[in-house]
Amino acid sequence: MGYYSGNSGKIQFANTGQVSDGSTDMTGWRELPLRVSNWSINTSVQLLETTSLGDWDRTTEYGVRSHTGQMRILYYTEDANVQSSPSNNAASWFIGALTMASTQGGAGSLGQYSDQGEYKLSNSPVKVRLRLFLRETSTALRDYIDFEARLTSVSYGSAVNEITAVDVNFEASGQIIKNNL
């Protein structure tokens, strides 16, 4: 029997339009250099009151579920001589996915939507698909949760004697696609 620890955790991410629902392969998932300090997800449900006049005890039914979470990604690049962009830096990818600056270097790697159909503006935030791993093995995809997420905030900065990190907050859109925990 073994215990899991934070050093075996990992995340994968993709533009929602680049992976299929229920996909267990790696097609479309980002393999950029990525160092994650931590991640967490919280699932909660609203209770609907079903108590009637004359009842002595409160009764409830399950209502709407929500899944929210956060992660801290270290601003990391394998080659310090190359300028960071969404095509070579995971932290930069998340910053770009929410802000979609029109002059963003490497913006094409975000998988921007075309100016047709549901997404009229190519500078709209990217719909993100996340896989949060408790543990990953080289032989099988296991111990993860997979869902479509909406980034609600991305914050970053720089401080003396600190490693630069990007804090990402997200909320799942719809139900969890795969819970393999």
Image: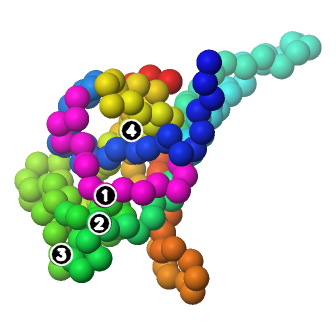
At 51% from the left and 74% from the top, the residue drawn is 163
- The mark total stands at 4
> Residue at 67% of width from left, 26% of height from top?
48
Label 4 sits on residue: 131
- As drawn, the label of residue 75 is none
Helix, strand or loop at disc 4? Answer: strand
Residue 116, image x, y percentages: 8, 53
Residue 58: horizontal and vertical position, in percent? 83, 19
Q: Are marks 1 and 4 in contact (CB under 8 Å)?
A: no
Instruction: Measure how far apart labels 1 and 4 are at the Cα level.
Output: 16 Å
Q: Which of 66 and 59 lies nearest the eye of the viewer? A: 66
**Quarter placement of the N terminus:** top right
**Disc marking residue 105:** 3
- Report the Cα–Cα distance between label 3 and label 4: 25 Å
Of marks 4 and 2, which one's residue comes earlier in the chain?
2
What residue does disc 2 label? 78
In percent of the image, x 66 and y 18: which residue is there?
61
